[in-house]
Image (cartoon, grey):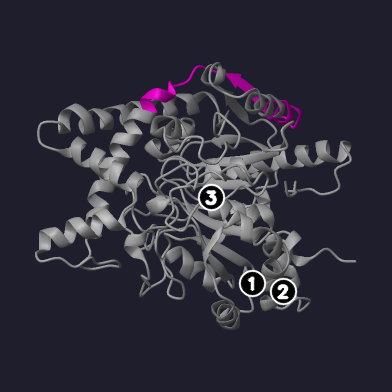
């Protein structure tokens, strides 16, 4: 019996659809009829999807193209004309965008069809996908645990097999951390390489659209389709996007930085074990380990949460009950604003708006916001100095594996520290790739993170593929039958 289409890679799916072996509608519905029937009621990865919209999507999809017939899931903060865009918030309930985001338009032009919109932490503020107006998403590897956030719905949908590709946004690690918790690849490209036009803004100088997939080659395929300049986004990077066609060309001679000082304290043993195993795999594949000392994460955390909350307080001012979504009527305009925003925004969003407004207020701007920007400059310089000595860095994506639902909801600082290894890349604007490295002794996914200088996506994908090949070999040696570790219900 042939393998069901939802188990294959996006690249293999394109071959089957373009050859006429499989219809685009069947490729899309295979995920819904197969794994989603088993997982979606409990995982709750998707918040907007209906069969008629999916049928129209496949009927209008181009039959040819680099992503012909490939179903994709989009995070609920990417604007689409055929599904609501609510950012996981009550304040945007029922909002339908009049245009597609540039990334969405390019996906449609490449022949892909939209399988639905994914759950997320409200306005991308969170590390667990527990702060959504639709309720939490669960990790398919262990339903008592979180999938990470804020793009947890996108990561979980790829992990359990609904789609081979999904898109999210990464402001401080919101693609890479859920990718690590759900055992899939997660790419945060160089700032400006993917257009932000149509991505609802959280922190404009930090936000970047990111890619989830089960295979390194599928990440490269999706990146080659959506990356590139955009006249609708003034922050998009000029010039052609880096060529990632050499993603399978190996890592012989590449130097990877090994900043072991970062995980001396506070990392779970399973995380460190995954790092050491990945470093050994890279060395066996011909890469060279370069030990180095690197920046303390606490500086990055403090700088990030000042910059991000300040920009969020400005960006979210537009949601006032007048122009978009929810409106709570009142006798005067001031009361309308207060009531709408109090009822529409959840507690985490309100907390960050207050923090950002305070940081920008008269008398505190120099003490907080300006100081954070100076720390950001220092972090960029430290990355620049590190990349003189190595081609990319190998470090954890998160200090722990997936934690339990509710474990950190009442401790915002503990939740914020989940991003301690990811936020530096957003502050510096450099690319990062989470690579799964199998399952740990707990049965939960293990992962590592690769960081490179600007436009180093080809290098990161080569290293990611090298780890994938070594991982496949290790799993085969342990008599695992599949190249991707699928979750089992527990």
- Label 1, label 3: how far apart the Cα atoms are: 26 Å
- Label 2, label 3: how far apart the Cα atoms are: 29 Å
**Which label is found at residue 438?**
none
User: Can residue 243 be seen in the rendering of this structure?
Assistant: no
Instruction: Give coordinates of residue 483: x percent, y percent.
Output: 79, 48
User: Can residue 108 be seen in the rendering of this structure?
Assistant: yes
Left/right placement of residue 384 relative to residue 243 reads: left
Q: Which residue is mark 1?
A: 68
Question: Is residue 230 positioned above or below 136 on the image?
Answer: below
Marks 2/3 in contact by CB < 8 Å: the verdict is: no
| Mark 1: few/some/many CA within 10 Å (<14, 14-19, 20+) | many
Residue drawn at (10%, 36%) of the image: 362
Closer to the camera: disc 1 or disc 3?
3
| Mark 3: few/some/many CA within 10 Å (<14, 14-19, 20+) | many
Q: Which residue is mark 2?
A: 17
Identify the image quadrant of residue 297: top left
Instruction: Determine the secondary structure under disc 1.
Output: loop
| Depth order, front residue of 225/34 | 34
Question: Is residue 204 positioned above or below 414 on the image?
Answer: below
Marks 2/1 in contact by CB < 8 Å: the verdict is: yes
Residue drawn at (61%, 54%) of the image: 43
Comes first in the chain, label 2 or label 1: 2
Instruction: Determine the secondary structure under disc 3.
Output: helix
Magenta span covers which residues? 278-300
Instruction: Give coordinates of residue 257: x percent, y percent.
Output: 57, 25
Q: Which residue is mark 3?
A: 152
Screen quadrant of the N terminus: bottom right
């Amino acid at each position: 019996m042939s393998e069901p289409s939802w188990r294959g890679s996006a690249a293999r799916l394109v071959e089957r659809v373009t050859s006429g072996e499989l219809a685009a509608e069947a490729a899309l519905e295979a995920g819904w009829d197969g794994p989603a029937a088993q997982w979606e009621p409990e995982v709750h990865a998707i918040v907007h999807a209906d069969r008629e919209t999916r049928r129209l999507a496949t009927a209008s999809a181009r039959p040819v193209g680099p992503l012909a017939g490939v179903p994709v899931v989009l995070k609920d903060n990417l604007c689409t004309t055929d599904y609501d865009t609510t950012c996981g918030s009550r304040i945007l309930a029922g909002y339908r965008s009049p245009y597609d985001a540039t990334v969405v338009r390019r996906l449609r032009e490449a022949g892909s069809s939209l399988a639905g919109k994914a759950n997320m932490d409200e306005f991308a503020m969170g590390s667990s996908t527990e702060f959504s107006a639709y309720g939490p998403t669960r990790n398919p590897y262990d339903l008592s645990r979180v999938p990470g956030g804020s793009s947890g719905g996108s990561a979980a949908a790829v992990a359990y097999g609904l789609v081979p590709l999904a898109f999210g946004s990464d402001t401080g690690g919101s693609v890479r951390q859920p990718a690590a918790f759900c055992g899939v690849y997660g790419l945060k490209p160089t700032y400006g390489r993917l257009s932000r036009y149509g991505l609802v803004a959280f922190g404009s100088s930090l936000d970047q659209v990111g890619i989830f997939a089960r295979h390194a080659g599928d990440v490269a395929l999706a990146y080659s389709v959506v990356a590139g300049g955009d006249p609708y986004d003034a922050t998009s990077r000029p010039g052609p996007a880096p060529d990632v066609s050499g993603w399978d060309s190996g890592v012989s001679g590449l130097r990877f930085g090994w900043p072991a000082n970062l995980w001396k304290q506070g990392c779970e043993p399973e995380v460190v074990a995954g790092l050491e195993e990945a470093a050994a795999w890279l060395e066996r594949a011909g890469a060279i380990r370069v030990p180095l000392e690197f920046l303390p994460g606490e500086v990055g955390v403090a700088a990030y949460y000042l910059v991000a909350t300040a920009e969020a307080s400005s960006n979210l001012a537009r949601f006032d009950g007048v122009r978009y979504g929810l409106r709570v009527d009142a006798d005067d305009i001031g009361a309308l604003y207060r009531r709408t925003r109090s009822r529409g925004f959840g507690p985490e969003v309100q907390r960050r708006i207050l923090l950002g407004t305070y940081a920008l207020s008269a008398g505190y701007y120099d003490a907080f916001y300006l100081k954070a920007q100076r720390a950001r400059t220092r972090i960029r310089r430290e990355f620049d100095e590190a990349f003189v000595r190595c081609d990319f860095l190998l470090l954890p994506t998160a200090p722990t594996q997936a934690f339990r639902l509710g474990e950190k909801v009442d401790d915002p600082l503990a939740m914020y520290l989940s991003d301690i290894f990811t936020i530096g890349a957003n502050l510096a604007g450099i690319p990062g790739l989470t690579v799964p490295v199998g399952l740990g002794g707990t049965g939960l996914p293990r992962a590592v993170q690769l960081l490179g200088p600007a436009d180093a996506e080809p290098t990161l994908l080569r290293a990611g593929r090298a780890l994938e090949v070594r991982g496949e070999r290790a799993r085969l040696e342990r008599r695992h039958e599949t190249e991707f570790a699928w979750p089992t219900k527990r």
